[in-house]
Image (tube, rainbow, N blue to C red):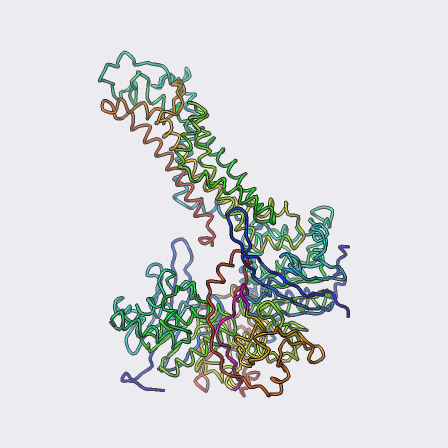
Amino acid sequence: MQVEAYDGPLLEVSDLSVTFRRRGQRDVHAVTGVSFTVEAGEVVGLVGESGCGKSVTALAITGLLPPRGVEVTGSARFAGAELLTMDPKQRRDLRGRDIAMVFQDPISSLNPVVPIGVQVAEVLIRHRHQSRTVAQREAAQLLDRVGIPDPNRRLKEYPHQLSGGMRQRALIAMAIACQPRLLIADEPTTALDVTIQAQILELLKELVRELNTALIMITHDLGVVAGMCDRINVLYAGKVVETAARRPLFAAPHHPYTVGLLNSIPRLDAPRGERLHPIPGSVRDLLPWPEGCAYAPRCTRRVEQCLAGTPELIPAPDGRNYRCVNPDLERAGVPA
Amino acid sequence: MTAEPTQQDPTQHPTQDAVDSGASRGLSTQPRPPGPFGQRRAERIDRLAELAATPPDERGESLTRETFKRLRRSPMAIAGSVVIAIFVVIALVGPLLTPPPAWLSFLPLYGPTAEVGLDQIRPGHIPGNSADHWFGLDHLGRDVLSRMLFGARTTLLVGVVATMIGFTVGAAIGGLAGAANALGGRVGRWLDTTLMRGIDMLLAMPPLLLAFSVAAVLGRSLLAVMIAVGVAAVPFFARLLRGSMIAQAHRDYVLAASSLGVRRPQIVLGHVLPNSLAPVIVQATLTLATAIIEAAGLSFLGLGNPDSRTPEWGTMLAQAQNQLSVRPELAIYPAVAIIITALGFTLLGEAMREALDPKLRR
Amino acid sequence: MSALLEVRDLKVHFPITRGIIFERVIGHVRAVDGVDLTIQAGQTYGLVGESGCGKSTLGRAVLRLTEVTEGSVVFDGIDLTTLTPEQLRVMRQRMQMIFQDPMSSLDPRQNVESILTEGLAAHGIGRNRAERRELISETLDAVGLPRWALSRYPHEFSGGQRQRIGIARALALRPDLIIADEPVSALDVSIQAQVINLLEELQDSLGLTYLVIAHDLAVVRHISDVVGVMYLGALVEEAPSDLLYAEPLHPYTRSLMSAVPIPDPDLEDRRERILLAGDLPSPANPPPGCRFHTRCPWAQPELCPDERPPLQEIRPGHRVACHWVNEIADGRIRPHEVTAELVSATEDTTTAPTLPATPVP
């Protein structure tokens, strides 16, 4: 890992909370006290099901949440600078130049009436103050870099003329245009076919390696993170319930939710005829965190203590943390 | 083919397993982990799961009910409804009060055609409002307030009947075209195309011009105005319902119904049509507003009701233009009344559109 | 075991039309272009492929929810393509469908009772409402929905519960064959397993036959006895599901298999990825010869660009459509670089109105 002049993690999120407040409705605590760090060049996964707060976390870090009706507390320091209280103009400069995002749906992230080339060049003009001609030339190189065939022709095309995979590549080209130090990919392959997904994931891995960009990978797919993330944070109902390096996590998941997720997905390499072990209930059946563990209503290892307030993150060897009072350490292969 | 139930043996029934994995039952059927588990805590968490699973009231909430609930909370809908309610009450009661019955004779109201103040009218002078005539007199010495009250009914009638004509004819054409396109195969698509080209021709004509032509053919009468305004609204209703039906017909639930073996007419009438009507009803509310304005416009242009015994706000506005320099109020009263009424319908229509928008739901 | 469903040389071509009143056909989208498959009674046949490969269209064509251009669909000895609309309607009682999106496949204005009894009423089962209600209460238990669900509306349920309603609707008529089109892909990960298990339980207890259509190879392999892999409107490989994973023979299957992420870091790091170049060609203008040769890392200059390989039985129960299957299996032909060809999405958009929405996974 490359250490830069600033001596500390590239991104340090601590105790981040996001609350949506709407008049006449109950407050929604989308994210409550999320902490994690991202080192330079590291790939960090945020994994969870819909509504677990993984996307909101990313939006809060980048300051893309709507300003009204949302309360963000805690801290998110990027290379030492606090993002949450940063002047909006400064943050806009940072975004796109040092922090870039790739979203799930490339068609709605691209402007439908502006050619791809112009959209990529705009990033360069805005952040690197290049002239139009230089930017156009570099845009072609970028499209070539992300594997878009015949980039000079593609520059003049509109988003609807590209296939889904090509659109996502164009979006990645825009994101890496300024060689950002942090790339946030929010479900970048969910809308794509599996062979195209493999192409895009391979591309992201290459870019991380070549540009030494840190990557936050937000996904619901444990298979995706298994192949590329250095560290993985599993989120449930707006809190990190387990965080570990990828090998220990998959070898010995500690939190019952992580175990449940792993047991509930059919694996391509599993022998046939094995039953899946689904997690009972749905994400709607949750307990508010202050009253206990939000996962308790669905948990098969629930004990009385689960309802005695929010469980703390318990540190374990290998830099692992888990938020559970009754983890199945034996099954996880850890001597108790 | 028999409908013999295949699940007769209760022991083979997968109920228990299915429920265990079921989201709906939450915890109540979960095997409890062994060990100390406080009974009270257990009850608490079970109740929580039940709360999450059981909505508060017994009956399910249909979309229509939910929409009404949302409408009741919308200030726009409330304002619109109040305006419309006042307008409707005036339309119903107005003609009964002009002239007022004996026990209300203290009210300064008169018959709509009674030229009660003719003696006060001189060239270049029309008296303004007074205790006897709250809105003043018109150029023939008739009480303006009385004529406004009486005219409300005609105005409402013109709006409602015109909208109904537009709605009925438009929805019939649009519904037929939509049904034909969605489920009629090749012949259906041809029928749809033919009908819609006809509608396109109507659509290509400016509505006012269309109304003009109809009124010109039928002569000057209130009915002509209604038909003219109604016909002008036909293409909008037809297009809207057809588009809405085609969109609904491509939804999966229509496919599901046909794979269930439901007959096509039943699919169209039971699924496609009811789900397509919402935007058309919204449009009808909005059309009521424009119909009133258009009817007033036609009357203003001299195509309206020539019979001065049944006053109508548009006609009043038209007649007021000769006295504009003498008594501008004569034009202002009916104009403001038309604007407020149209605004009422527009407000309600917009609120309904919002309440029905699936994007804003939940 | 006997064949419940036999599909022979099935073709579904959607015309691309132009014209103001009289439509002129200017081309065809070959959504399904010659598919043969057989499903044994009580079995699960899994159909896997990427979006645009025609798998959903095939599923609908089997039920004749989409008109068949050519070929036959023989269900329990009856050729469905020859039936009159009314005969077909009666026949539908025995074949049901489960949809991908549980929200859009349920009429928002119907309550659950009405959704479940509609099919019964259409086929004249049960004399009155009370009787039909009795009939569906069992179905409700079978899918794990409580009784109070009957009076409620689809929007009041969670995604997993809605899918249970969709399954109950299909079950209410006690069908023999159920076609499930992406039954879990719209659901959360933890809910997917509930629905997969439910489908398996129902098959065990009711003796159902399934045709499961999905883009997720892991799901399809888990649930199916036989898996067919589709590419651009045709089957490229068909095998018992264990065999398919152990020994994929068609180059497309191999690359598809290698692209599926597995939640196991060691395996992910070790295994070889066969990355396909470019995108799926347009089904309105499929490449000549082998449909896959434009993206195939094993493609050869002879045969592949000119001749369409037939689906041949290579091993017992294992059918592959590839000219060089044996040579590739032996390692005599090695994979090579493929330059991505330009596939313009605009061609697809012109066909969009006639093509039923294909679910994007």
The overriding secondary structure of the stretch rendered in magenta is loop
Depth check, front residue: B165 or B145 = B165
Residue A46: image quadrant is bottom left
Q: Count the numbered circles shown.
A: 0
**Where residue A160 appears, x then y in whole percent?**
43, 63
User: Is the residue A100 above or below the residue C176 in the image?
Assistant: below
Residue at the image position 25 percent from the left and 23 percent from the top: B327
What residue is drawn where x is 39% and y is 44%?
Answer: B75
Q: Of all residues shown, which one is farthest toward the top?
A: B119
**Which quadrant does the N terminus of chain C fall into?**
bottom right
Residue C63: percent from the left, percent from the top? Answer: 66, 59
Q: Is residue C336 magenta-colored?
A: no
Stretch of the chain drawn in magenta: C270-286
Q: Nearer the viewer, residue C308 or B40?
A: C308
Nearest the viewer among C240 and B132 is C240
| Res. A251 visible in picture | no
Q: Position of residue C97 (x, y in %)?
A: 64, 60
Left or right relative to A268: residue C38: right
Q: Residue at x 42, y 74 (%)?
A: A149
Provide residue B207's location: percent of width, then percent of height. 41, 36
Vertical position of residue B31 compared to residue B354: above or below: below
Q: As drawn, is B348 to the left or to the right of C336? A: left
